[in-house]
Image (tube, grey):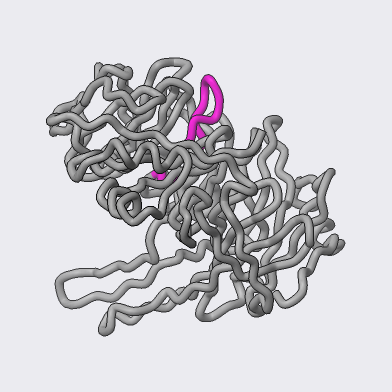
Amino acid sequence: MKKATLVLVIALLAGLAGCGQKQSISDDIIVVDITKAPSSKKELILQDFMDVEYVALETKDDFLNRGVVHDIGKKTILVTNQDDGDIFVYDRTGNALRKINRRGQGGEEYISCFNITLDEENEEMFINDISLQKIHVYDLYGNFKRSFQHKKGNGTLFYNDIFNYDKSNLICYDQYNEKIPFVLISKKDGSITKEIKIPFKKKILLLQQTRDEEHIYIKTPGPYRRIITFKGNWILSETSSDTVYTLSPDYSLYPLLVRTPSIQTMNPEVFLILRFFSDRYYFMETIKNVFDFSTGKGFSRTFFMYDRQEKAFFNYTVYNGDYTIKKEIYMNWLRPVNHEIESWQALDANQLIESYNNGELKGKLKKIAATLNEDSNPVIMLIKHKK
């Protein structure tokens, strides 16, 4: 990507029209040639293009956690330790409200808590229990309300991504579904209310596997989202498709970017993964679908971004402007939240204390770090679109 390729792909649009899709009404389609690498690099300060807020999670003897944020509302933050069934409910400023644990084998309990989706308007949370292929619904005090199964058929295993779509529906993605991985489902009973059809020839998975006489071993490059919230719209990235789409509130699909060469023609495949979207910069990466089980190495990556203003691709480094030193933020670590909060990252208390003692902090982060001790819960950095 030495030079940006920003064109209207006439043949593609004709094909999309044949699939019932609509052409973008505002921007040209960005074409990403994954065989080329950017020759230029930008160094960016996160606060120059995003707003940043810090929330210090209150620490109590029974309120110790790793700060794994699942969802954030206007009044509520849901946090877990990831593996013990505890759900910590905080208010929006980080005050500890209550701890919930409904883990167990009963009909009103969950075995696993893969992700949690907050519906603040209805005062409910949806626990994605992939062990049971089931969604459990509780109120924000942990009282069981109902549960329902994930959809079945077409190779479906479980929903990987679940987001709060509107008052009545969740939007879900199942990476193993061979035909229609994106669906809207009812919050009441899990029934499918809308199928979102992304055209692709055949399903291709980003994973490698090997086996011995008794077991099958599967390796993946780590988590990434196929649904990204972006200022009222939804960006849908089915990695078996060469096109990334924007889903508008009226369910129309608009092509946002196209990769070349086609994922369907590559061996081994190189996947295009989207990470973070701002008004100006789109951060993404490529991952080669190769892993050596004998050495434990593989899934090589290339990180880059697209600058919408300059219409060019760049290598990049992003720094946190609340440090006096060059403190890098790894954009592939960030996780999408909702339309207000683009992403979050947990900052370890011990590391913040060390940076504070070394005089490396400034502004609000410095003030928060001054109040921490070694037993403090993490500080959550919220990354929001500028108003």
Residue 162 lies in the magenta-colored region: yes
Residue 347 location in percent, x, y?
A: 35, 47
The answer to whether residue 193 is seen in the rendering is yes
Residue 92 lies in the magenta-colored region: no
The answer to whether residue 256 is left or right of residue 146 is: right
Q: Which residues are magenta?
A: 159-171
Residue 83 location in percent, x, y?
A: 21, 45
The answer to whether residue 63 is left or right of residue 41 is: left
At 81% from the left and 64% from the top, the residue drawn is 6
At 34% from the left and 79% from the top, the residue drawn is 297
At 45% from the left and 66% from the top, the residue drawn is 206
How many numbered markers are drawn? 0
The answer to whether residue 369 is left or right of residue 54 is: left
The quarter holding residue 54 reads top left
The residue sitting at the bottom extreme is 294
Identify whether 364 is placed above or below 219. above
Q: Nearer the viewer, residue 96 or 234?
A: 96
Identify whether 94 is placed above or below 372. above
- Location of the C terminus by quadrant is top right
At 49% from the left and 73% from the top, the residue drawn is 301
Identify whether 98 is placed above or below 149. above
Residue 166 location in percent, x, y?
A: 55, 25
Residue 110 location in percent, x, y?
A: 22, 33
- Location of the N terminus by quadrant is bottom right
Q: Nearer the viewer, residue 314 or 10?
A: 314
Q: Nearer the viewer, residue 209 or 219?
A: 219
The answer to whether residue 23 is seen in the rendering is no
